[in-house]
Image (cartoon, helix red, strand yellow):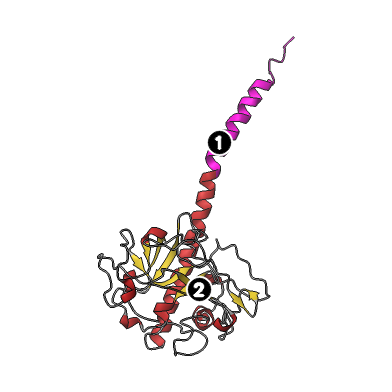
């Protein structure tokens, strides 16, 4: 009589298998999470490439000026509402939202704009900037776009006020955001999505300060930036400066507020490296 010699797994063997599976999960899950984050970072970078190309096309059509905002060229908004002005060049709301941005719009037909326009760039003609490769045009922010009291903005409306702009004060080293009518307190409503800037940082006493601990990086340790020449690069906070100190280490003598500014030894991109005013 032929006997069945097949034996079942005993409890110890099953436990060993479960331990191996658990160890593999611990090793592989972070790899999968990193890959997923990399996909979001790359998708965000692609968004910014499209927006950067559209911004330069807009400037070409408007005498070297970026979107001025929803009022006029009188330097009263410095780019607030740039999304609605740029939308006809994109014809899609998709590129305005980073896939890693967790802020959700609360109004029907609204879009969360994940990016801010550099106010120094929108307040001046592009020909005035001598360091376009190192000058920020578009940056990632954590300021929820708001229009008429709701989160999100309608990009098809050329008079929308929800897309933000930001500027850095070179004397206080604060980052200011404008994502609503300034008369209604639209100033200073968000945080950078990069981290804390290089150089002198203020204490974390206000939600929009450059040194605020709420300036949490959106992608790993940094965020994506569009420069004035149209190229896009990823940067950690230590690589970003306000503009008092140039890449060669010299300080702007034309800007009195920059006198005595600490050096930015690791910064290679700036919001205002030419010392222009708003």
Residue 152: x and y in percent read 61, 74
> Residue 276 sits in which quadrant?
bottom left
- Seen as rendered, the residue at the extreme right is 1
Query: What type of secondary structure mainly makes up the magenta span?
Result: helix
Counting from the top left corner in percent of width and height, residue 175 is at: 46, 70
- Would you say 7 lies left or right of 227 here? right
Mark 1 or 2: the one toward you: 2
> Observer-nearest residue: 138 or 144?
144
Q: Is residue 98 left or right of residue 150?
A: left
Above or below residue 259? Residue 34 is: above
User: Which residue is the site of mark 2?
Assistant: 177
Say which element carries label 2.
Answer: strand
* Residue 151, placed above or below residue 8: below
What residue is rendered at 46% in x and 72% in y?
50
Determine if the magenta segment contains residue 224. Answer: no
- Could you say whether the residue bearing mark 1 is in a helix, strand or loop? helix
Whether residue 75 appears in this view of the structure is yes
Quick one: quadrant of the N terminus?
top right
Q: Is residue 133 above or below residue 85?
A: above
Q: Nearer the viewer, residue 179 or 16?
A: 179
Q: Tag 2: Cα neighbours inside 10 Å, few (<14), some, or many (≥20)?
A: many
The residue at which mark 1 appears reads as 24
**What residue range appears in magenta?**
1-29
Q: Locate residue 82, reporting x and y percent.
A: 50, 80
Q: Nearer the viewer, residue 206 or 51?
A: 206
Q: Earlier in the sequence, mark 1 or mark 2?
A: 1
Q: How many marks?
A: 2
Apparent side of residue 87 relative to residue 201 in the rendered image (left or right): right
């Amino acid at each position: 009589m032929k006997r069945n010699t097949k034996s079942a797994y005993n409890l110890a063997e099953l436990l060993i298998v479960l331990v191996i599976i658990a160890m593999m999960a611990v090793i592989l899950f972070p790899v999968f999470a990193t890959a997923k984050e990399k996909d979001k970072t790359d998708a965000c970078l692609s968004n910014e490439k499209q927006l950067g190309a559209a911004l330069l096309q807009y400037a070409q059509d408007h005498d070297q000026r970026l979107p001025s905002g929803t009022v006029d060229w009188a330097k009263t908004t410095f780019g607030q509402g740039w999304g609605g002005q740029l939308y006809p060049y994109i014809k899609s709301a998709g590129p305005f939202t980073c896939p890693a941005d967790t802020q959700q719009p609360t109004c029907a037909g609204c879009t969360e704009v994940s990016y801010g326009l550099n106010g120094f760039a929108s307040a001046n003609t592009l020909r005035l900037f001598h360091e376009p490769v190192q000058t920020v045009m578009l940056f990632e922010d954590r300021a929820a776009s708001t229009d008429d009291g709701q989160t999100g903005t309608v990009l098809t409306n050329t008079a929308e006020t929800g897309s933000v702009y930001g500027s850095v004060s070179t004397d206080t080293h604060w980052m200011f955001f404008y994502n609503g009518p300034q008369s209604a307190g639209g100033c200073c409503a968000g945080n950078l999505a990069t981290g804390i800037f290089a150089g002198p940082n203020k204490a974390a006493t206000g939600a929009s300060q450059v040194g605020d601990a709420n300036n949490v990086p959106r992608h790993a340790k940094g965020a994506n930036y569009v420069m004035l020449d149209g190229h896009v690069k990823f940067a950690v906070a230590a690589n970003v400066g306000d503009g008092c100190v140039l890449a060669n280490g010299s300080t702007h003598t034309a800007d009195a507020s920059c006198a005595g500014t600490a050096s930015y030894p690791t910064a290679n991109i700036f919001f205002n490296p030419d010392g222009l005013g708003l």
